Image (cartoon, grey):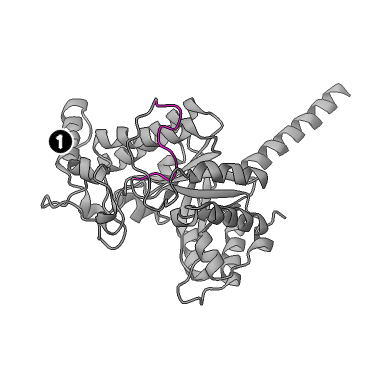
Amino acid sequence: MKLSRFFVFLIVILIAGSALLHSETRSLWATSWDINTPQKIVKVVKTAAEQNFDTIFAEIRYRGDALYKPNRFDRTFPNPEPISYFITIDGFDPLAFLLQTAESFNIKVYAWMTTFVITPLYTYKLPKEHVFFTHPEWICRTNDDEPMVSHNGGEGAYLDPGIPEVQRYTQDIILDVVANYSIDGIILDYIRYPGDEYSYNSLALEHFIDDVTEKNYSNNYTEWKQRAISDFIRETGEKIKFLKPDVDFAVTAKPDNHEAKYRFYQNWEEWLQFKDLDYIHLMMYTKSDASFQDMLEKNLAKIASPKIAISLRAWDEQKRYTSEEIQSKIRLAKEYGFDNISIFHFGGLVANGYQLADTLTVK
Protein backbone atom coordinates (compact mmCIF):
# COMPACT_ATOMS: atom_id res chain seq x y z
CA MET A 1 0.00 0.00 0.00
CA LYS A 2 2.81 2.37 0.94
CA LEU A 3 4.68 1.45 -2.25
CA SER A 4 1.59 2.13 -4.33
CA ARG A 5 1.15 5.59 -2.77
CA PHE A 6 4.82 6.29 -3.45
CA PHE A 7 4.41 5.59 -7.18
CA VAL A 8 1.31 7.77 -7.36
CA PHE A 9 3.28 10.56 -5.66
CA LEU A 10 6.18 10.06 -8.10
CA ILE A 11 3.88 10.26 -11.13
CA VAL A 12 2.32 13.48 -9.83
CA ILE A 13 5.78 15.00 -9.36
CA LEU A 14 6.86 13.99 -12.88
CA ILE A 15 3.70 15.42 -14.45
CA ALA A 16 4.10 18.66 -12.52
CA GLY A 17 7.75 18.92 -13.57
CA SER A 18 6.85 18.33 -17.20
CA ALA A 19 4.16 21.01 -17.01
CA LEU A 20 6.66 23.50 -15.62
CA LEU A 21 9.17 22.74 -18.35
CA HIS A 22 6.60 23.13 -21.10
CA SER A 23 4.41 25.84 -19.57
CA GLU A 24 2.87 28.23 -22.05
CA THR A 25 4.06 31.81 -21.88
CA ARG A 26 2.79 34.81 -23.81
CA SER A 27 5.05 37.86 -24.09
CA LEU A 28 4.59 41.30 -25.65
CA TRP A 29 7.54 43.40 -26.86
CA ALA A 30 7.31 47.12 -26.03
CA THR A 31 9.78 49.47 -27.71
CA SER A 32 11.56 52.39 -26.04
CA TRP A 33 9.22 54.97 -27.58
CA ASP A 34 6.23 53.08 -26.18
CA ILE A 35 7.44 53.26 -22.56
CA ASN A 36 8.90 56.78 -22.28
CA THR A 37 5.99 58.36 -20.36
CA PRO A 38 3.76 57.16 -17.50
CA GLN A 39 0.67 57.38 -19.71
CA LYS A 40 2.21 55.18 -22.39
CA ILE A 41 3.35 52.61 -19.85
CA VAL A 42 -0.16 52.34 -18.39
CA LYS A 43 -1.51 51.78 -21.91
CA VAL A 44 1.07 49.04 -22.62
CA VAL A 45 0.26 47.21 -19.38
CA LYS A 46 -3.51 47.48 -19.78
CA THR A 47 -3.29 46.26 -23.40
CA ALA A 48 -1.11 43.35 -22.34
CA ALA A 49 -3.65 42.38 -19.66
CA GLU A 50 -6.61 42.69 -22.04
CA GLN A 51 -4.92 40.49 -24.66
CA ASN A 52 -3.87 37.78 -22.18
CA PHE A 53 -0.13 38.44 -22.19
CA ASP A 54 1.66 37.40 -19.02
CA THR A 55 5.01 39.09 -19.70
CA ILE A 56 6.21 42.40 -21.14
CA PHE A 57 9.61 42.73 -22.79
CA ALA A 58 10.41 46.41 -22.21
CA GLU A 59 13.21 47.97 -24.27
CA ILE A 60 15.12 49.81 -21.57
CA ARG A 61 18.36 49.99 -23.57
CA TYR A 62 17.72 51.24 -27.10
CA ARG A 63 21.15 52.18 -28.49
CA GLY A 64 23.76 52.41 -25.78
CA ASP A 65 21.44 54.49 -23.59
CA ALA A 66 19.22 54.07 -20.54
CA LEU A 67 15.47 54.16 -19.96
CA TYR A 68 16.22 53.56 -16.29
CA LYS A 69 18.66 55.06 -13.77
CA PRO A 70 22.23 53.75 -14.20
CA ASN A 71 23.87 52.78 -10.89
CA ARG A 72 20.58 53.59 -9.20
CA PHE A 73 21.56 52.31 -5.72
CA ASP A 74 24.19 49.63 -6.10
CA ARG A 75 27.30 50.91 -7.93
CA THR A 76 29.13 47.58 -8.12
CA PHE A 77 28.95 47.48 -11.90
CA PRO A 78 30.12 50.71 -13.60
CA ASN A 79 27.47 52.05 -15.94
CA PRO A 80 28.33 55.33 -17.71
CA GLU A 81 25.53 55.15 -20.28
CA PRO A 82 23.50 58.34 -20.77
CA ILE A 83 19.78 58.69 -20.20
CA SER A 84 17.92 58.03 -23.46
CA TYR A 85 16.79 60.97 -25.57
CA PHE A 86 13.37 59.29 -25.60
CA ILE A 87 12.86 60.45 -22.01
CA THR A 88 11.61 64.03 -21.95
CA ILE A 89 10.40 64.13 -18.34
CA ASP A 90 13.21 65.09 -15.97
CA GLY A 91 13.93 62.37 -13.43
CA PHE A 92 11.42 59.89 -14.86
CA ASP A 93 12.43 56.24 -14.51
CA PRO A 94 10.43 54.17 -17.04
CA LEU A 95 11.63 50.81 -15.76
CA ALA A 96 10.74 51.54 -12.13
CA PHE A 97 7.29 52.84 -13.10
CA LEU A 98 6.65 49.88 -15.39
CA LEU A 99 7.57 47.37 -12.69
CA GLN A 100 5.21 49.04 -10.23
CA THR A 101 2.36 49.20 -12.77
CA ALA A 102 2.78 45.66 -14.11
CA GLU A 103 2.79 44.21 -10.59
CA SER A 104 -0.78 45.42 -10.12
CA PHE A 105 -1.82 43.31 -13.13
CA ASN A 106 0.29 40.28 -12.18
CA ILE A 107 2.36 40.73 -15.35
CA LYS A 108 6.07 39.91 -15.42
CA VAL A 109 8.64 42.35 -16.81
CA TYR A 110 11.81 41.47 -18.71
CA ALA A 111 14.41 44.16 -19.32
CA TRP A 112 14.88 44.04 -23.09
CA MET A 113 18.39 45.29 -23.87
CA THR A 114 19.96 45.67 -27.28
CA THR A 115 23.48 44.35 -26.89
CA PHE A 116 26.13 45.21 -29.47
CA VAL A 117 24.26 47.70 -31.68
CA ILE A 118 24.83 51.07 -30.01
CA THR A 119 23.72 53.91 -32.29
CA PRO A 120 20.43 54.98 -33.85
CA LEU A 121 20.19 55.91 -37.50
CA TYR A 122 21.73 59.34 -36.87
CA THR A 123 24.40 59.93 -34.23
CA TYR A 124 23.68 63.65 -33.81
CA LYS A 125 21.03 62.63 -31.27
CA LEU A 126 23.69 61.16 -28.98
CA PRO A 127 25.54 63.08 -26.25
CA LYS A 128 29.31 63.40 -26.36
CA GLU A 129 29.71 60.95 -23.44
CA HIS A 130 28.08 58.16 -25.45
CA VAL A 131 30.25 55.06 -26.02
CA PHE A 132 30.19 55.66 -29.80
CA PHE A 133 32.25 58.80 -29.22
CA THR A 134 34.27 57.76 -26.18
CA HIS A 135 35.43 54.44 -27.65
CA PRO A 136 35.58 54.71 -31.46
CA GLU A 137 38.25 52.01 -31.42
CA TRP A 138 35.57 49.47 -30.40
CA ILE A 139 33.36 49.98 -33.47
CA CYS A 140 33.04 47.14 -36.00
CA ARG A 141 35.18 47.64 -39.11
CA THR A 142 35.42 46.25 -42.63
CA ASN A 143 38.30 44.29 -44.13
CA ASP A 144 39.55 47.65 -45.50
CA ASP A 145 39.60 49.04 -41.95
CA GLU A 146 36.61 51.29 -42.57
CA PRO A 147 34.53 51.86 -39.42
CA MET A 148 30.89 50.94 -39.46
CA VAL A 149 28.69 54.01 -39.80
CA SER A 150 25.35 54.48 -38.14
CA HIS A 151 23.14 54.57 -41.25
CA ASN A 152 23.85 51.07 -42.53
CA GLY A 153 20.36 50.06 -43.52
CA GLY A 154 18.81 51.45 -40.37
CA GLU A 155 20.28 49.22 -37.67
CA GLY A 156 23.07 51.50 -36.48
CA ALA A 157 26.74 50.94 -35.69
CA TYR A 158 27.89 47.97 -33.60
CA LEU A 159 30.59 47.39 -31.04
CA ASP A 160 32.79 44.42 -31.99
CA PRO A 161 31.94 41.46 -29.70
CA GLY A 162 35.42 40.01 -30.25
CA ILE A 163 37.05 42.75 -28.16
CA PRO A 164 37.35 41.71 -24.48
CA GLU A 165 36.86 45.31 -23.28
CA VAL A 166 33.57 45.48 -25.19
CA GLN A 167 32.36 42.32 -23.48
CA ARG A 168 33.29 43.60 -20.02
CA TYR A 169 31.70 47.00 -20.67
CA THR A 170 28.47 45.42 -21.93
CA GLN A 171 28.27 42.88 -19.11
CA ASP A 172 28.60 45.66 -16.54
CA ILE A 173 25.63 47.48 -18.12
CA ILE A 174 23.49 44.33 -17.98
CA LEU A 175 24.49 43.39 -14.43
CA ASP A 176 23.86 46.94 -13.22
CA VAL A 177 20.20 46.57 -14.25
CA VAL A 178 19.96 43.13 -12.62
CA ALA A 179 21.46 44.47 -9.38
CA ASN A 180 19.28 47.56 -9.13
CA TYR A 181 15.81 46.48 -10.29
CA SER A 182 13.41 43.70 -9.28
CA ILE A 183 12.96 42.46 -12.83
CA ASP A 184 11.70 39.00 -13.73
CA GLY A 185 14.14 38.54 -16.58
CA ILE A 186 16.72 39.94 -18.98
CA ILE A 187 16.40 39.45 -22.73
CA LEU A 188 19.35 40.40 -24.91
CA ASP A 189 18.70 41.45 -28.51
CA TYR A 190 21.21 42.08 -31.32
CA ILE A 191 23.60 39.72 -29.58
CA ARG A 192 25.59 39.14 -32.74
CA TYR A 193 27.85 40.64 -35.35
CA PRO A 194 26.03 42.89 -37.87
CA GLY A 195 27.26 40.64 -40.69
CA ASP A 196 30.45 39.03 -41.92
CA GLU A 197 31.49 42.22 -43.75
CA TYR A 198 31.86 44.11 -40.45
CA SER A 199 33.99 41.73 -38.42
CA TYR A 200 37.57 42.94 -38.94
CA ASN A 201 38.29 45.33 -36.09
CA SER A 202 42.07 45.26 -35.50
CA LEU A 203 41.68 44.87 -31.72
CA ALA A 204 39.50 41.81 -32.23
CA LEU A 205 41.95 40.40 -34.79
CA GLU A 206 44.82 40.88 -32.34
CA HIS A 207 42.88 38.96 -29.71
CA PHE A 208 42.16 36.19 -32.22
CA ILE A 209 45.87 35.91 -33.07
CA ASP A 210 46.77 35.81 -29.37
CA ASP A 211 44.24 33.04 -28.77
CA VAL A 212 45.57 30.97 -31.66
CA THR A 213 49.21 31.54 -30.65
CA GLU A 214 49.01 31.27 -26.87
CA LYS A 215 46.12 28.90 -26.29
CA ASN A 216 46.52 26.58 -29.26
CA TYR A 217 43.07 27.39 -30.65
CA SER A 218 42.15 26.39 -34.18
CA ASN A 219 43.20 29.00 -36.74
CA ASN A 220 39.61 29.49 -37.88
CA TYR A 221 38.35 33.06 -37.61
CA THR A 222 34.71 32.10 -38.22
CA GLU A 223 34.71 29.59 -35.35
CA TRP A 224 36.49 32.11 -33.13
CA LYS A 225 33.79 34.74 -33.73
CA GLN A 226 31.09 32.19 -32.99
CA ARG A 227 32.86 31.35 -29.77
CA ALA A 228 33.21 35.03 -28.82
CA ILE A 229 29.41 35.38 -28.93
CA SER A 230 28.79 32.03 -27.23
CA ASP A 231 31.28 32.73 -24.44
CA PHE A 232 29.69 36.12 -23.80
CA ILE A 233 26.24 34.53 -23.45
CA ARG A 234 27.42 31.71 -21.22
CA GLU A 235 29.47 33.99 -18.95
CA THR A 236 26.72 36.62 -18.75
CA GLY A 237 24.19 33.96 -17.78
CA GLU A 238 26.49 32.63 -15.06
CA LYS A 239 26.93 36.13 -13.60
CA ILE A 240 23.20 36.95 -13.73
CA LYS A 241 22.29 33.71 -11.94
CA PHE A 242 25.03 34.20 -9.35
CA LEU A 243 23.70 37.69 -8.65
CA LYS A 244 19.98 36.79 -8.72
CA PRO A 245 19.20 33.10 -9.36
CA ASP A 246 15.48 33.74 -9.93
CA VAL A 247 15.99 36.19 -12.81
CA ASP A 248 15.31 34.56 -16.19
CA PHE A 249 17.98 34.95 -18.87
CA ALA A 250 16.91 34.99 -22.53
CA VAL A 251 18.41 36.00 -25.88
CA THR A 252 17.18 36.50 -29.44
CA ALA A 253 18.57 34.84 -32.56
CA LYS A 254 18.06 34.60 -36.29
CA PRO A 255 15.90 31.51 -36.99
CA ASP A 256 17.82 30.10 -39.97
CA ASN A 257 20.53 27.90 -38.47
CA HIS A 258 23.04 28.37 -41.28
CA GLU A 259 22.58 32.12 -41.67
CA ALA A 260 22.67 32.65 -37.92
CA LYS A 261 25.86 30.66 -37.50
CA TYR A 262 27.91 31.78 -40.51
CA ARG A 263 26.74 35.33 -41.21
CA PHE A 264 25.90 36.60 -37.72
CA TYR A 265 27.98 34.08 -35.71
CA GLN A 266 25.04 32.98 -33.55
CA ASN A 267 25.54 29.29 -32.86
CA TRP A 268 22.20 29.04 -31.09
CA GLU A 269 22.01 25.25 -31.21
CA GLU A 270 25.08 25.27 -28.97
CA TRP A 271 23.45 27.85 -26.69
CA LEU A 272 20.67 25.38 -25.89
CA GLN A 273 23.22 23.50 -23.77
CA PHE A 274 24.03 26.50 -21.53
CA LYS A 275 22.51 25.74 -18.13
CA ASP A 276 22.06 29.42 -17.19
CA LEU A 277 20.27 30.38 -20.42
CA ASP A 278 16.52 29.95 -20.02
CA TYR A 279 15.13 30.89 -23.46
CA ILE A 280 16.16 31.61 -27.04
CA HIS A 281 13.58 33.69 -28.91
CA LEU A 282 13.83 33.00 -32.64
CA MET A 283 12.73 36.02 -34.66
CA MET A 284 10.36 34.45 -37.19
CA TYR A 285 8.88 37.61 -38.69
CA THR A 286 7.55 36.34 -42.00
CA LYS A 287 3.96 37.18 -42.94
CA SER A 288 3.56 33.97 -44.95
CA ASP A 289 2.21 30.83 -43.27
CA ALA A 290 4.00 28.67 -45.83
CA SER A 291 7.32 30.40 -45.16
CA PHE A 292 6.74 30.15 -41.41
CA GLN A 293 6.04 26.42 -41.60
CA ASP A 294 9.10 25.96 -43.82
CA MET A 295 11.27 27.66 -41.17
CA LEU A 296 9.82 25.36 -38.52
CA GLU A 297 10.49 22.27 -40.65
CA LYS A 298 13.95 23.32 -41.78
CA ASN A 299 15.34 24.57 -38.49
CA LEU A 300 13.30 23.11 -35.64
CA ALA A 301 11.76 19.79 -36.71
CA LYS A 302 14.56 17.84 -34.99
CA ILE A 303 14.94 20.17 -32.00
CA ALA A 304 12.75 19.52 -29.00
CA SER A 305 13.79 21.99 -26.34
CA PRO A 306 11.67 23.94 -23.85
CA LYS A 307 14.23 26.72 -24.24
CA ILE A 308 13.06 27.56 -27.76
CA ALA A 309 10.57 30.43 -28.00
CA ILE A 310 8.98 31.84 -31.14
CA SER A 311 8.75 35.59 -31.74
CA LEU A 312 6.04 36.54 -34.25
CA ARG A 313 5.50 39.68 -36.30
CA ALA A 314 2.59 41.94 -35.37
CA TRP A 315 3.06 45.01 -37.52
CA ASP A 316 2.32 45.97 -41.10
CA GLU A 317 2.75 49.43 -42.56
CA GLN A 318 0.17 48.70 -45.27
CA LYS A 319 -2.30 47.27 -42.72
CA ARG A 320 -2.88 44.18 -44.87
CA TYR A 321 -1.54 41.63 -42.40
CA THR A 322 -4.47 40.42 -40.30
CA SER A 323 -5.08 39.08 -36.81
CA GLU A 324 -6.14 35.77 -38.35
CA GLU A 325 -2.77 35.41 -40.09
CA ILE A 326 -0.94 35.93 -36.80
CA GLN A 327 -3.29 33.52 -35.04
CA SER A 328 -2.62 30.83 -37.63
CA LYS A 329 1.12 31.08 -36.92
CA ILE A 330 0.49 30.81 -33.18
CA ARG A 331 -1.45 27.62 -33.83
CA LEU A 332 1.29 26.27 -36.13
CA ALA A 333 3.96 26.96 -33.53
CA LYS A 334 1.92 25.12 -30.91
CA GLU A 335 1.38 22.18 -33.27
CA TYR A 336 5.17 21.86 -33.49
CA GLY A 337 5.39 21.90 -29.70
CA PHE A 338 6.43 25.51 -29.13
CA ASP A 339 4.18 27.10 -26.54
CA ASN A 340 6.43 30.01 -25.58
CA ILE A 341 5.23 32.78 -27.91
CA SER A 342 6.27 36.43 -28.02
CA ILE A 343 4.58 39.09 -30.14
CA PHE A 344 6.58 41.91 -31.72
CA HIS A 345 5.38 44.49 -30.98
CA PHE A 346 2.96 46.61 -28.90
CA GLY A 347 2.95 49.54 -31.35
CA GLY A 348 2.01 47.32 -34.28
CA LEU A 349 -0.59 45.51 -32.21
CA VAL A 350 -2.39 48.78 -31.44
CA ALA A 351 -1.90 50.48 -34.83
CA ASN A 352 -3.33 47.50 -36.70
CA GLY A 353 -6.06 46.69 -34.18
CA TYR A 354 -4.88 43.11 -33.76
CA GLN A 355 -6.95 40.90 -31.47
CA LEU A 356 -5.00 37.89 -30.22
CA ALA A 357 -6.54 37.26 -26.80
CA ASP A 358 -8.37 34.04 -27.70
CA THR A 359 -5.37 32.44 -29.43
CA LEU A 360 -3.04 33.45 -26.59
CA THR A 361 -5.25 32.01 -23.87
CA VAL A 362 -3.95 28.82 -22.28
CA LYS A 363 -6.18 25.91 -23.28
Residue under the point 83% across and 23% down: 3
Q: Using residue 118 as the reference point, say whether residue 274 is left or right of it.
A: right
Q: Position of residue 8 (x, y in %)?
A: 81, 32
Q: Is residue 190 above or below residue 214?
A: below
Relative depth, front residue between 332 and 46: 46
Relative depth, front residue between 188 and 130: 130
Residue under the point 31% across and 61% down: 154
Residue reaching furthest left?
Answer: 144
Q: Secondary structure at mark 1?
A: helix
Residue reaching furthest right?
Answer: 1
The quadrant where residue 20 appears: top right
Which quarter of the rendered picture does the C terminus lie within? bottom right
Q: Position of residue 158 (x, y in %)?
A: 27, 49
Q: Position of residue 248 (x, y in %)?
A: 53, 37
Residue under the point 52% across and 44% down: 110
The rendered magenta stretch, by its main secondary structure, is classed as: loop
Q: What range of the chain is rendered magenta?
A: 65-75
Q: Using residue 144 as the reference point, say whether residue 235 is left or right of it.
A: right
Looking at the rendered structure, the kind of residue marked 1 is Glu
Residue under the point 32% across and 36% down: 80
Whether 185 is among the magenta residues is no
The quadrant where residue 124 appears: bottom left
Relative depth, front residue between 34 and 136: 34
**Residue wearing tag 1:** 206
Residue reaching furthest front?
Answer: 90
Q: Is residue 305 above or below residue 330?
A: above
Q: Position of residue 329 (x, y in %)?
A: 56, 64
